[in-house]
Amino acid sequence: MEVINVINSRRSIRKYKKQDIPNEKILQILDAARHAPSASNIQPWEFVVVKDKATKEKLSRVNVYGKFIVDAPVAIVVIGDESRSPGHWVEDCSLAVENMFLAAKALGIGGCWVAVFSLDSRGLEREKKVKEILSIPEKYRVLCIVALGYPDEEPAPRNLRNLDELVHFEKF
């Protein structure tokens, strides 16, 4: 698929076929994440790949909006080393996740972001739970859980704001 087509046709997928994703494709997706830009090329991201049903069940209870994680063939927990990039780990890891979504779409795989990190106490509680479930060392921060699988749904195109509502040339 051409990159613009991949970007324009990507959707958040929450229903998956009961079909495993080969490790080769998972590694292709993570390699795309590894190629994301990061502040000063620090690359603060790390990834925990989860296929175990019992572990996905626990992860699916971390965020009320992530119940579908249990049915995804793969869940990838995206973590950042805040000590490597104290001011930009969130942006850096977010860029890596977007690369993951685009690579997955190009490979015929759907995905959905499930938030863990947020600036409020709920985010800290979610991070604590994920760290406990996956034995993630304290120094790391948990950004999100990416559910991946072969789509078993075709969501309609999203309603997007018109470009003329949000683009400003030279001045606001």
Image (tube, helix red, strand yellow):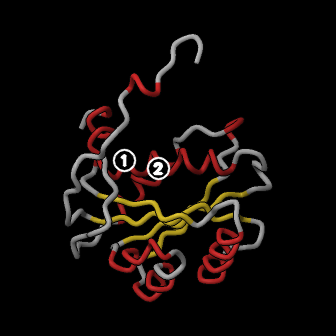
**Relative image position of residue 142 (x, y in whole percent):** 63, 65
Residue count near mark 2 (Cα–Cα under 10 Å), binned few <14, some 14–19, many ≥20: some
Residue found at x 65% / y 72%: 122
Q: Secondary structure at mark 2?
A: helix
Q: Outermost residue toward the top? A: 170
- For the point 31% across and 51% down, the residue is 11
Residue 79 disc label? none
Q: Earlier in the sequence, mark 2 or mark 1?
A: 2
Q: Is residue 45 left or right of residue 81?
A: left
Residue 57 in the image: state x and y as whole percent: 44, 85
Q: Measured along the vertical axis of the image, is residue 73 above or below residue 169?
A: below
Amino acid type indicated by mark 1 = Ala
Q: Which residue is pictured at 31% across the width and 47% down the height?
A: 10
Q: Position of residue 15 (x, y in %)?
A: 27, 69
Circle 1: is it few (<14), some (14-19), or many (20+) Cα within 10 Å? many
Amino acid beneath label 2: Asp
Closest to the observer, 88 or 76? 88
Nearer-the-camera pick, 150 or 62? 62
Discs 2/1, front: 1
Which residue is labeled 2 in the image? Answer: 31
In percent of the image, x 37 and y 45: which residue is there?
102
Pick whichever, 157 or 100, lies toward us: 157
In this picture, is 42 found above or below 26?
above
Dot label at residue 103: 1
Q: Quadrant of the N terminus?
A: top left
Q: Are marks 2 and 1 in contact (CB under 8 Å)?
A: yes
Q: Assign a secondary structure to mark 1.
A: helix
Spatial CA distance of label 2 from label 1 is 9 Å
- Quarter of the C terminus within the rendering: top right
Would you say 20 lies left or right of 134 here?
left
Q: Name the foreground residue: 121 vs 67.
A: 121
